[in-house]
Image: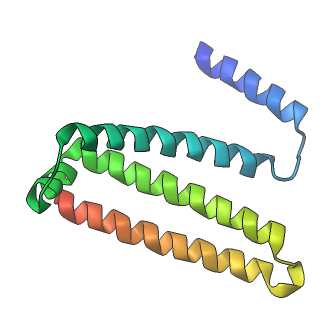
Amino acid sequence: MVGSVARGRIMAQISAKHPREPGFGHWRWQRISAVATLGLMLYFTYLVASMGPLDYSAAMAFVAAPQHAVALAILVIAGLFHAALGVQMIIEDYIPLASGRLALVTIARGVFAIAAMASLVSVGMIAGLI
């Protein structure tokens, strides 16, 4: 309970410093997703490097382990979310509004959503959940 109150006070202070600044939420989520993606990439790099060379069946068994499947699913979600935010920023910064910026952002989000769903279904199939 005390932690929740302290966290609420901190968020209130941050909100008071940045009252309805456009882009603050986008900036914050971009940083959060970058840290999550970096941590998970380091985790997988360490795991794969410590295991040595893998053949197809060993790689399938690696991904099928529940802890690795969950971590890989979180990595897919965080990484593609981060990529979608980055592409959105590029579109908003370099594409004029008259050129269909909103349509391009919507298409980019759709492409990343399809890639995320395909990746999650693949991980689920390998893990035996689907």
Q: Residue at x 54, y 76 (%)?
A: 111
Against 59, residue 12 (above or below) is above
Residue at (51% x, 70% y) in the render: 113
Q: Is residue 12 left or right of residue 21?
A: left
Query: Is residue 128 something that shows in the picture?
Result: yes
Seen in the picture, residue 5 relative to 85 is either above or below; the reply is: above
Residue 130 shows in this picture: no
44 lies left or right of 110: left
Q: How is the image coloured?
A: rainbow
Q: How many marks?
A: 0
Q: Residue 103 location, x and y as percent?
A: 72, 82
Q: Position of residue 7 (x, y in %)?
A: 67, 23
Say which quadrant the N terminus sits in: top right
Q: Judge whether 78 appears above or below 42 on screen.
A: below
The one of 42 and 31 positioned closer to us in this rendering: 42
Can you name the residue that lies furthest to the bottom here?
99
Residue 128, image x, y percentages: 16, 60
Q: Is residue 38 left or right of residue 16?
A: left
Looking at this view, is 38 or 29 the one in front? Answer: 38
Instruction: Tell me the quarter of the image containing the C terminus.
Output: bottom left
Residue 16: % across, % down:
88, 31
The residue located at (34%, 42%) in the rendering is: 45
**Residue projecting furthest to the left:** 57
Single out the residue that lies furthest toward the top: 2
Residue farthest along the front direction in this orientation: 53
Residue at image coords 86%, 52%: 22
Q: Is residue 77 above or below residue 51?
A: below
Quadrant in the rendering for residue 119: bottom left
